[in-house]
Image: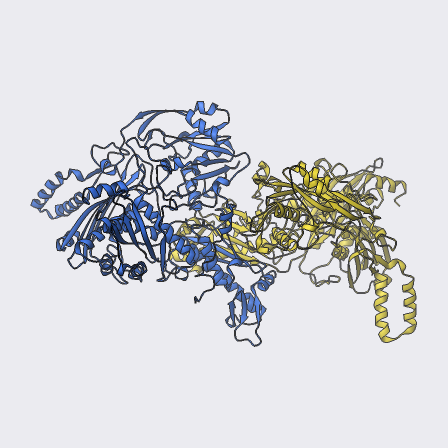
Chain colours: A blue, B yellow
Amino acid sequence: MSEYSVVSKSVPRVDALEKVTGTAKYGADIQLPGMLHGKIVRSKHAHAKILSIDTSEAEKLDGVRAVVTQADVASGRKIFASDKVMYLGEPIAAVAATDADIAEEATDLVKIEYEVLPVVQDVMEAIKSDAPRLHSDATKDGPRRRAITAKLKQLSEESDSEEIRQLNAELDNLEDELYYNISAENHIEAGDVEQGFAESDLVVEDTYVIPRVHQTYMEPHVSVAQVDPSGKVTAWASTQGPFAIRSGIAGNLGIPLDQVNVIATTMGGGFGGRFGVVLTHVPAVLLSQKTGRPVKVQMSREEEFTDGRPAPGCVIKLKTGVTNDGRILARQALGFWDSGSISGASIGSTVRIRGVYNFPHLKVDAYGVHTNKSGTAAYRAPGAPQAIFAGESQLDEIARRLGMDPVEFRLKNMREEGDQVPAGGKEVKVGYKETLTAVADAAGWWNREKGENQGWGVAVGDWTNGAGPGGVYVSLHEDGSARIFHGSIDITGTDTAITQIVAEVLTLPYERVKITRGDTDSAPYATGSGGSVVTFTMGNAAKIAAEDTRARILELAAERLNTDIDNLKLENGEVSLVDADPPKSISLGELAAYSTSRGPIVGKGSFARKPSTPALAAQIAKVEVDRETGKIKVLKMVSSQDVGFAINPMAVEGQIEGGTVQGYAWAIMEEMQYNENGNVNPGFVDYRVPTSADLPTVESVIVEVPAPNGPFGAKGVGEPPITPTLATMANAVVDAVGVRINDLPIKPEKVLNALSNNGK
Amino acid sequence: MSEYSVVSKSVPRVDALEKVTGTAKYGADIQLPGMLHGKIVRSKHAHAKILSIDTSEAEKLDGVRAVVTQADVASGRKIFASDKVMYLGEPIAAVAATDADIAEEATDLVKIEYEVLPVVQDVMEAIKSDAPRLHSDATKDGPRRRAITAKLKQLSEESDSEEIRQLNAELDNLEDELYYNISAENHIEAGDVEQGFAESDLVVEDTYVIPRVHQTYMEPHVSVAQVDPSGKVTAWASTQGPFAIRSGIAGNLGIPLDQVNVIATTMGGGFGGRFGVVLTHVPAVLLSQKTGRPVKVQMSREEEFTDGRPAPGCVIKLKTGVTNDGRILARQALGFWDSGSISGASIGSTVRIRGVYNFPHLKVDAYGVHTNKSGTAAYRAPGAPQAIFAGESQLDEIARRLGMDPVEFRLKNMREEGDQVPAGGKEVKVGYKETLTAVADAAGWWNREKGENQGWGVAVGDWTNGAGPGGVYVSLHEDGSARIFHGSIDITGTDTAITQIVAEVLTLPYERVKITRGDTDSAPYATGSGGSVVTFTMGNAAKIAAEDTRARILELAAERLNTDIDNLKLENGEVSLVDADPPKSISLGELAAYSTSRGPIVGKGSFARKPSTPALAAQIAKVEVDRETGKIKVLKMVSSQDVGFAINPMAVEGQIEGGTVQGYAWAIMEEMQYNENGNVNPGFVDYRVPTSADLPTVESVIVEVPAPNGPFGAKGVGEPPITPTLATMANAVVDAVGVRINDLPIKPEKVLNALSNNGK
């Protein structure tokens, strides 16, 4: 029996009814009088110089109201390609017309002359000296070059000429460690990996290749912008971060921040891919500025694939040293992340190959690499599924070679409170072992059985929710019901969790608390809805606001009941005198009515940062591989997660299931496939996402090791469950048929191919 | 040089641009996908029994989606007439159709059988025993009957049989003091008027007749209602009181308050007439409930006249006793207010015949009287223009008979701080004399000259702003600009005043503070925008919220500058160390950025009641009367007003001008004229409102006697300026041509008629 009345309960989502009945307003539902429709003119080449852009024919088309190009961007910030295109589908212009078909037709009438340039799509090709140069001729040093250069700098001060000579000679021979087309780099080191590997009994080295995948949210990007005669911008945006869109529009177009109002619409999925401002929001504003009319810009599914901002693929070379009794000593990673035409996203996540294990020596060198593809962005625990796939696959391989149980091997090495995190601080109170043990127990790991071609895989993934600034208001209305007002967009039921938190503090039934999202002109700043941050940040802010409201409630009740606050308790929506005989109380409704002479009861809450606590997701899959077709069938999928405290267990289970199946799809199905011309598989016919028929049943196991700073102990729950699944699936396949696929996705043809090569 | 930077300045209104460019969204601008149009089916008779209502033909019309009658009102509350109609235009049913023309056509197809009843339109006829009975047969005692009955009750306890006999005999003869069709009554007494009149040297008695006038706001009533599948109501309403509309819809239809959300649209004028919920809002909700689609119900101008809620007309019999040296001793009023078919509005204002004068004996008996007209509602200082017309006309007449200067006569009798208000408390610090003196000085009263048929009139009117509960939020955004969020509807520039108040407290430029109105689901409770209440209540709440914000600003600044709050000052949007050398400061923008690690800076304010301070408006008009046509031409109109503190002098002048010209129109032009069948002059062809060509130039004089509880000393300014003008005009006409018209409006034909009768 929970000590709580509303939190810890699986109440229905606040938006359940509008979602089920179809009355929720998504971006595409926004219709404004006189609204125009905008379409983006896109590059037909993956790499080319633009020789000329001629918009005159498009402008002459009946119904076309405006064409904008980079020349219309007064700020000078790059919105459209003007001299060079870097990927197929890159925006070059945008057209606004009276309907979407005319706009589409007009995009073809914009005449662009190109000089086609050579294309590079593969990161390992792109870093080579003979690769086409995308942004510059500059190079970056690889790990050994960096080490030598650092050493040389140190030695030149000490003047040890023999060593200097040798190092210079080595440097001259290190041609392959001069990387081209690098967009960003990240280097992390703890201890001395060389020493660690030297002390190891077993050193394993592998290369892992993880493809670029799309977030495949249901709703494509869409914006409606309306610029009024004063230049004030109102933008309806389907986004994870209304305030980020506000500052993005303002910053890109040189408009003062307070001249931009962003009204977020109900979001049809985001997963990290719905923060970008340039895709539709900025073009819509430019077209509205030019036409004086509201303009809607909506991407097609094809445009989502060619010009969305998917998760980066990467190549990770990973090396781990262990002792014969199963102690990890050192791990080293070299990662190349395909950042496409813009700066590298997620490369910092390469460090997650360290996992949740206790070892002294770590070295991580990660590079973002430019290719002729669209840029990338976050996708549910950005970078973690990729790095953890490498880390947990290799650990599984090591356990296999050492002949150790993979769960026991992990438990043996797992960090506990007070342990040193490699290249990090001391571990706080965490639930790593509890969570792994919980999934093993629930899955029947310890007595597992398997038939022919069947296997069991286990993996764990860690993630720590973010935090950001956010303000929340709570007010009590005259019927004694409460209202929450805030500016963060609901993601995965966060509005429901916030509502539960406020109801709990005010001791009101869940149904008596209503939550409303304000636009950026009305709500206090709210952090973006990503990074598993919302329930932690906005939940804390809401809790503070509810407590502020409760304080005022008690103040008024003390006045009304003619007593001190200390003699009062708030329970079941009533303030009553403690130990009064006969009982004496006043309801929140009566107090709210009383407040008509004392002023409405209002509360405020503000929160930004307090340390978050790492969360673990642990998964066990039992699979069966068809040796004839290479197809993998999941017989069992159990997913445990330390959620700190489950404010809404049903919603938490939804997150665990959702993350697990997204990881499952990445492991065996999903892949953005670019050909040599830069074409990608641009739709759900060629890009396979699982249907409900493809999906395993996921059994969720909730573990609760409270986070000291989470509201009621809650941790962010959205991201962790996707992190281990890629490795879980790979590890299960090895256990089933003895082939380890390090190059995702584990498609049937790869399995068949590996089987025919005896697992090589 | 003002001590303030933003308040006391005539900054442009926050909504200036949207009003000027036509982008403001009024109720009529709301268009929703699938929206139906509703029309009201109205009675063709002013008084009749309804024998039957047949909606079948209307329902069959192509495009009609629903017809609702009282039978559809599950709550049982009266929305439509079902057994009897009480006025011409009374709603009997409502129709929703795919367009407004079809809906209009369908209203004619609703077949209603009536049994016509006799009609009564005149209040003095309605109170008689032979008048048709509208609601009941009950009677109310007149003033003398009440006095005798009270005396008899007292005597019967003392058993003085002779006096009892005489009083009973008088009672028997008092047939005309048994009033029928009374809707409400109000009795106020101080001192002993009989004694006062006995001690007087001059007693004057007159009867004043003031017509019913319409508020003639530009925008007719309009609502759009959408009921979602859960029964949740969203109503877009052009209203002065979104929260009143919420509770009105909820109460009338038996819907829980938290299942109704009211989104107020920009208001095209209200003047007190835009609070009613039944006119369009409730029918729109009923039609949406029945059809499942959004429904717009918009009144035509004709419907506004037949079924609006205009200001009540009245008949006031007034008696004043004075000494020969010009001291007022006693005033007695008997008022009959035409409340139409519903309960009496404004009758409590009859007491305003006491004016701002110091006298001991007062008696007021007021009655609301049912007639076969629509109900009435508030109109700018409800009831005050009517009562003050009587009071100030009669004072002028007395001054004339005593041979005293009417300004000096008023100054001699005016109350000052500490004086006893007849039937009231002690007078607080007021500016009555200052305000009257100011207008006299400004108008050149003391050296006034007049040509033939020219005259000068003076009058004063008093009003005290109301107060109500309201909450306001203020937040600081990352660019250092501030946002105000609240739920009250802007009336006469109140959003501008609130914005100035917050900017002043935060020492920000006016342009850096934005204000947004929330709907009733998002904003804390706000009092309705009437009763000159908004700047007082919401301005105070906003000031508290801004001060709360400032406190947090200083707290963060102290942390950043590593000092105590006491060492800091906030000036010009910067917090700086007092007496620091070199100077050390941090801007609000820097602090807002810092707050990303400390939580957004948010503030809250709540206010309800603190005593308000009476405000006086004083006016002087110089007119010329054309003896050939009876037409009155205003040569000069000066209007002074004690506004406490002018937060925005330009806006205050706008209120003074607007109120004065509305009073001017009531005085000489406006009148709802009902014929014996209940027909009224239903449009601007027959109901004359002044055009700009008709209007005098109003010279405004701002007097500032600070209100202790007003924000920065401000008093509510909207209502006072209409209160004296009816009398000002009448008094000027007397001075010009010697005829006093006590029966408004002072139309040319009345002037001519009076002139031909030598002023009788």
Residue B606: quarter of image: bottom right
Q: Is residue A270 above or below residue B705?
A: above
- Give the total number of marks visible in the rendering: 0
Quadrant in which residue A127 is drawn: top left
Q: Name the residue: 16% across, 54% down.
A: A196
Does B460 appear above or below B36?
Answer: below
Does the rendering let one see residue A426?
Answer: no
Residue pictured at 29% horizontal, 48% vertical: A726
Q: In this view, does B30 lie to the left or right of B587?
A: right
Vertical placement of residue A32 versus A188, above or below: above
**The C terminus of chain B appears in which quarter of the rendering?**
top right
Residue A614 at x, y percent in the picture: 32, 57
Q: Which residue is drawn at 61% across and 48% down?
A: B289
Q: Which of A50 and A147 is in front in this view?
A: A50
Front position in the image: A85 or B631? A85
Q: Where is residue B622 in the image (x, y as percent from the top left)?
A: 76, 42
Expressed as whole percent of the image width and height from the top left, the position of residue B401 reads 85, 51
Is B263 in front, or is A721? A721
Q: In this view, does B720 lie to the left or right of B527?
A: right
Outermost residue to the bottom: A581
Percent x, y of residue B10? 58, 44
Q: Can residue B82 be seen in this view?
A: yes
Give B542 or A206, whichever is nearer the viewer.
A206
